């Protein structure tokens, strides 16, 4: 008896149907530059191979609206719904581009993984409306039902909620993927994977174990400062920042922020624009107004590098310091930042994930394709040591096409 592959998700358990191996992973990060997508072929061993990659930039209106949702404001529910609709259409365009570039069709794809756009992240929230135990939350604006309608493909979304319901922070979500793809089987080798998007997160992969956390701001402050002073969305290659000089007094002041100095037993493992944003930067620069803008930019790059090394040192307490730090995300293409990272971590070799077989701009989207694969196979995908959840959980929710 044969079965249409489009029914694989609904019947795989009752009839032992092996689902298709093609997945689309979508990611729109805190940099708010648009939707990145990959079409992956994932084997029975869970190893992904990227078939195609596509990017759809956000319009200025969508970017501004998504940014506005990061802080309380007027008519948030309506604005959130509108951003979700726009995100679904942009995501559907990415899916169409991926199918066109690969010569495949929707019926051949098992599922689309859609993370959505994070606009609030409060995993340690304590306030409740009644006497119920407090549970944190993380809000990703999305419209996976519309995306399923537009693409004709099952959509898996809402990856953070299950971990948060289990007492975790719902982030970082990618350490298990980093271990699976980049981890070494050599017990003497330790590899770190540092994702530098709007925020930065690191996974420490050592001897078949993995831990991870967000390290603080990645590109977000650098982008804000570049937009303000050179009128560009970001500092291309870090060329402008490279003309400046790190101000050690400002750097020390920035590193005194509570996020970097909380007792590690109770430290948050995740962060977002809720904390590191334009208002935070404005307050942090009080007393340093006379610094040249390029010196501030150089110092913000040093903050990203130093905070990454700082958080990594805590993760490495019970394991070796990484021999290699593989960098992915947009920050991997900031040459000035890469120099700062290598200078801050001279005992490691710092290089892009490209050199380990996966282009830096494809890693996060590929991670979500892999998380969708885990969901289909009902495999747990959170790393308790990274999120703080009570135990391993299957992540995601299904929106059938």
Image: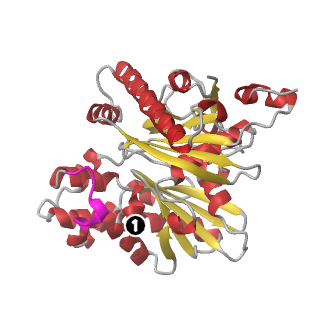
Q: Spot the residue most to the front.
A: 103
Give the x, y percent position of residue 337.
35, 67
Establish if 309 lies above or below 97.
below
Q: Residue 166 colored magenta?
A: no
Q: Residue 235 colored magenta?
A: yes
Relative to residue 48, is residue 343 drawn left or right? left
In front: 132, or 306?
Answer: 306
Query: Which residue is rendered at x = 55% and y = 73% of the image?
Result: 324
Establish if 145 lies above or below 121.
above
Q: Place residue 333 in its image quadrant.
A: bottom left
* Residue designated by label 1: 305
Residue 173 appears in the rendering: no
Query: Which residue is rendered at x = 28% and y = 60% of the image?
Result: 236
Query: Which residue is rendered at x = 20% and y = 67% of the image?
Result: 295
Mark 1 lies on a secondary structure that is: helix
Give the x, y percent position of residue 144.
53, 26
Q: Tell me the colour scheme of the image.
A: secondary structure
Image quarter hosting the C terminus: top right
- Magenta residues, as a range? 232-241
Give the x, y percent position of residue 136.
54, 35
Relative to residue 148, is residue 6 drawn left or right? right
Give the x, y percent position of residue 370.
64, 46
Q: Residues within 10 Å of mark 1 (few under 14, many from 20)?
A: many
In front: 10, or 223?
Answer: 10
In front: 92, or 191?
Answer: 92
Q: Place residue 330 in its image quadrant.
A: bottom left
């Amino acid at each position: 008896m044969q079965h249409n592959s489009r029914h694989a998700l609904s019947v795989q358990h009752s009839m032992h149907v092996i689902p298709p191996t093609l997945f689309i992973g979508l990611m729109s990060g805190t940099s708010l530059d648009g939707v990145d997508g990959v079409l992956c072929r994932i084997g029975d061993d869970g190893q992904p191979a990227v078939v195609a990659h596509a990017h759809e930039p956000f319009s200025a209106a969508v970017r501004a609206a998504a940014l506005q949702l990061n802080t309380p404001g007027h008519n948030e529910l309506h604005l959130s719904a509108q951003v979700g609709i726009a995100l679904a259409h942009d995501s559907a365009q990415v899916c169409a581009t991926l199918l066109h570039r690969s010569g495949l069709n929707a019926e051949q794809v098992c599922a689309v993984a859609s993370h959505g756009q994070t606009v609030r992240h409060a995993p340690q929230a304590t306030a409740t409306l009644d006497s119920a135990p407090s549970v944190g939350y993380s809000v990703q604006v999305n419209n996976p039902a519309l995306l399923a309608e537009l693409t004709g493909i099952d959509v898996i979304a809402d990856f953070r909620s299950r971990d948060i319901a289990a007492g975790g922070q719902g982030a970082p979500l990618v350490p298990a993927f980093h271990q699976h793809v980049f981890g070494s089987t050599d017990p003497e080798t330790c590899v770190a994977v540092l994702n530098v998007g709007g925020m930065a997160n690191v996974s420490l992969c050592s001897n078949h174990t993995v831990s991870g956390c967000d390290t603080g701001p990645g590109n977000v402050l650098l982008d804000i400062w570049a937009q303000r002073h050179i009128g560009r969305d970001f500092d291309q290659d870090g060329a402008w920042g490279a003309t400046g000089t790190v101000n050690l007094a400002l750097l020390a002041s920035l590193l005194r922020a509570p996020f970097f100095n909380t007792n590690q037993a109770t430290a948050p493992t995740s962060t977002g624009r809720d904390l590191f944003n334009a208002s935070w930067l404005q307050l942090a620069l009080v007393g340093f107004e006379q610094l040249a803008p390029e010196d501030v930019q150089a110092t913000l790059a040093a903050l990203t590098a130093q905070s990454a090394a700082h958080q990594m040192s805590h993760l490495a307490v019970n394991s070796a310091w990484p021999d290699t730090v593989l960098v992915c995300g947009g920050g991997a293409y900031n040459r000035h930042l890469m120099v700062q990272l290598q200078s801050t971590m001279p005992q490691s070799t710092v290089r892009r994930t490209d050199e380990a077989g996966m282009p830096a701009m494809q890693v996060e989207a590929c991670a979500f394709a892999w998380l969708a694969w885990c969901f289909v196979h009902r495999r747990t995908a959170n790393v308790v040591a990274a999120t703080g959840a009570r135990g391993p959980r299957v992540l995601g929710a299904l929106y059938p096409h």
